[in-house]
Amino acid sequence: MKKLVVLLFLITSLFANKVDTALKQCKKEYLYVLIVSNFCPWCHKFENQTLQDTKVKKSLQKDFCFVKLTRGDDSIAKKFSSTFSPSHYFLDKNGTIVLEDIGYKTSQEFLEILKDLKE
């Protein structure tokens, strides 16, 4: 029984720390946290279209760190309170949410968000 409890704790700790680990490793001004659901068509569209856009990829790679969490697979901190998918969170170096948004974004809409954050 003790081994099971320890194992569950370790597994939970691994998933709960994805954002914390990324914040510690991130050398950029912002961390972008994308929360999706496996059965969300808008999440898949965002990942397969918007995030695959060359300009979006370039901007994210240049100016942001990125973490993707999946509802039901990853432990999601309570501060990411939105139950909608996809959910978009931008955190500063201290882990404070500076921008929160929900829903599918076209490449142009998402690039505007990234541009506004950089200014």
Image: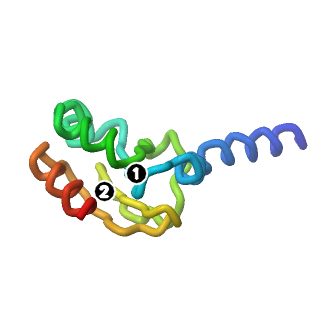
Identify which residue is drawn at 29% across, 49% down: 86
In-front residue for pair 29/23 = 29
Count of numbered circles in the view: 2
Dot 2 lies on which element?
loop
Q: Disc 2 marks which residue?
A: 84
In-front residue for pair 28/79 = 28
- The quadrant in which the C terminus is found is bottom left
Cα separation between marks 2 and 1: 14 Å
Identify which residue is drawn at 26% across, 62% down: 117
Residue type at mark 1 is Val
Query: Quadrant of the rendered structure where residue 46 is?
Result: top left
Horizontally, residue 84 falls left or right of residue 48, namely right
Q: Disc 1 marks which residue?
A: 33
Residue type at mark 2 is Phe
Horizontally, residue 117 falls left or right of residue 22, namely left
In-front residue for pair 99/59 = 59
Q: Residues within 10 Å of mark 1 (few under 14, many from 20)?
A: many
| Mark nearer the viewer, 2 or 1 | 1
Q: Which mark is residue 59?
A: none
